Image (cartoon, helix red, strand yellow):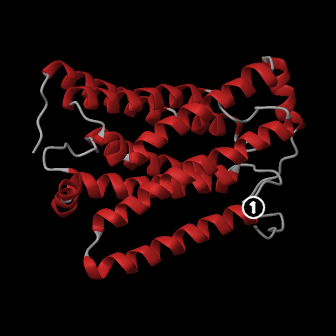
Amino acid sequence: MAAWNSIYLEVTYQVFGWIAFFSWSFSFYPQVILNYRRKSVVGLNFDFLVLNMTKHSSYLIYNAAMFFSPTIQRQYHEKYGFQEMIPVAANDVAFSVHAVALTAFTLFQVLIYERGTQKVSKTCTGITTAVLASAVVCLIIAWPKHSWLWLISVFNTIQVIMTAIKYIPQAIMNFRRKSTVGWSIGNILLDLVGGILNFGQLGVQSIDQDTWVNFYGNIGKTLLSLEVVFFDLLFIFQHYVLYPANKEERNQAIMQESVAPLIKPPDEPQSTLV
């Protein structure tokens, strides 16, 4: 089992990892708080939420399995070498657990706050269904030969793909509305910090071990960091350059949104939920 060569790099690795954890974890709260204050989720793309839940659930499966399973760790060492470190840290697992919980809570807000005419698209439903079906098929394939490392690598691949896909609906929605009102830039700024430090954590480990194995041994974490940085910079450009708005304009835009409660009061007829 590999050990750290430098105590300073080990400490740096842990510091980067936990700062990334707090940045990424706190990035969920501005949107949750914004939804609560507005009592509305208009402006928040529902496809983003559903795809995000699929993504984080897949990432949780990978991180938890790699971190806690001796069998999977043994299979990893057999493939990449027993001198290599496991490419998942405690902060990765903690983040995944927190991300699933907060995404689920945000989905709950969709049920209780005003949403206007927004709904989950058929495309999103189709993508999510295809991902779940693929996961089941891969489980069936992996089970007879106990190919657990391969199976969780599939989930890691799923989270990489879903990370790319999940950002696209929000970017398109911002473009069509020519506005980022109702969608919090705070979570993107924190998300960017987390992405940069997450990549830095991989770099620190590579410097200490004098190997690049952890970059491709956990290719999902590598690509995740790069995707996060790319899309966050895009969102920042949309918010501050393409569609800037002062406080008055934001309040006016919110008031002009066509909103309707998802759950009608008891004295009103219930509408069919889509």
In this orientation, does residue 53 appear? yes
Q: Nearer the viewer, residue 66 or 84?
A: 84
Residue at the image position 22 percent from the left and 46 percent from the top:
86
Residue 40 lies in what quarter of the image?
top right
Count the marks: 1
- Residue 44 rendering spot, x and y as whole percentages: 70, 43
Residue at 27% from the left image edge and 31% from the top image edge: 206
Secondary structure at numbered mark 1: loop
Q: Nearer the viewer, residue 187 or 124?
A: 124
- Tell me what residue is drawn at x 14 percent, y 22 percent: 6
Which quadrant does the N terminus fall into? top left
Q: Is residue 74 left or right of residue 167?
A: left
Q: Looking at the picture, how far across and down is residue 205, in whole percent? A: 26, 31
Q: Is residue 71 above or below residue 144?
A: above
On screen, residue 199 above or below 143: above
- Characterize the local packing of mark 1: few (<14), some (14-19) or many (20 or more) Cα atoms within 10 angstroms: few
Percent position of residue 169, x then y:
72, 48
User: For this view, does 115 lie left or right of residue 143?
Assistant: right
Residue at 38% x, 42% y is 95
**What residue type is disc 1 on?**
Ser
Is residue 98 shown to the viewer in this render?
Answer: no
Q: Which residue is mark 1?
A: 121
